Image: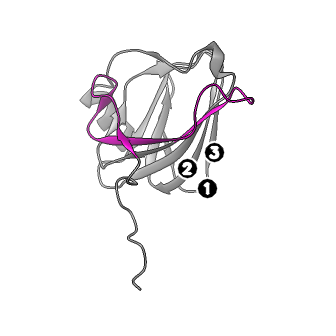
Amino acid sequence: MSEPAKDTAASPEAQRAAADQFTGVAFATILVPAGNPTDCVVGDVTFEPGARNNWHSHPAGQILVVTNGAGFYQEQGQPARLLRPGEVVSIAPGVVHWHGATATSLFSHYAISPNASQGIADWGGPVTDAEYQAAHAQ
């Protein structure tokens, strides 16, 4: 029996992320759906190289746990942070930000949304190519 493939873009149950909320190709698998007793939604999100989500915020905040590859996290008005497996980002409620892969690596993380009954995300506009390239220059 061969080993499972590594650094694949998505698992079979993954759904392609909405094109109006992402630049490039990303996939999400909902691990814990809305409506559960914890009121917490958990997704496993994988971005192909160069992919990123739009600027957005979360009414109740969010926690990202990086599981694979290399990617960026940036809060509006702050420098971008390079993220690697094992790193965790705790995002306060209402903080506008984006996250996504570097130009050369897949990037996967668990996205944990507490108090999901307050809403999951409020979406804004795309991260521009200039903003994305600036993240690489830091």
Sequence order check, earlier mark of 3 and 2: 2
As displayed, is residue 94 above or below residue 92?
Answer: above
Quarter of the image with the C terminus is top left
Residue farthest right in this picture = 37
Please state which of residues 11 and 122 is positioned toward the viewer in this rendering.
11
Q: Specify start and end residues of the magenta stretch as a single range.
A: 14-43
Residue at screen point 60% across, 27% down = 34
Distance, label 1 to label 2, CA atoms, is 5 Å
| Mark 1 and mark 3 residues within 8 Å of each other at the beta carbon | yes
Tell me the crowding category of disc 1: few under 14, some 14 to 19, or many 20 or more residues within 10 angstroms, Cα based: few
Residue placed under numbered mark 3 in the picture: 88
Residue placed under numbered mark 2 in the picture: 66
What number is the disc on residue 86? Answer: 1
Quarter of the image with the N terminus is bottom left
Amino acid type assigned to the residue bearing label 3 in the image: Val
Amino acid type assigned to the residue bearing label 1 in the image: Gly
- Image spot of residue 82 (x, y percent): 48, 46
Tell me the crowding category of disc 3: few under 14, some 14 to 19, or many 20 or more residues within 10 angstroms, Cα based: some
Q: Secondary structure at mark 1?
A: loop
Sequence order check, earlier mark of 1 and 2: 2
- Residue 138 visible in the current orientation: no
Amino acid type assigned to the residue bearing label 2 in the image: Val
| Mark 1 and mark 2 residues within 8 Å of each other at the beta carbon | yes
Residue at screen point 64% across, 25% down = 35
Q: Secondary structure at mark 2?
A: strand
Distance, label 1 to label 3, CA atoms, is 7 Å
Q: Is residue 93 left or right of residue 71?
A: right
User: Which of the 4 image quadrants contains residue 100?
Assistant: top left
What number is the disc on residue 65? Answer: none
| Mark 3 and mark 2 residues within 8 Å of each other at the beta carbon | yes
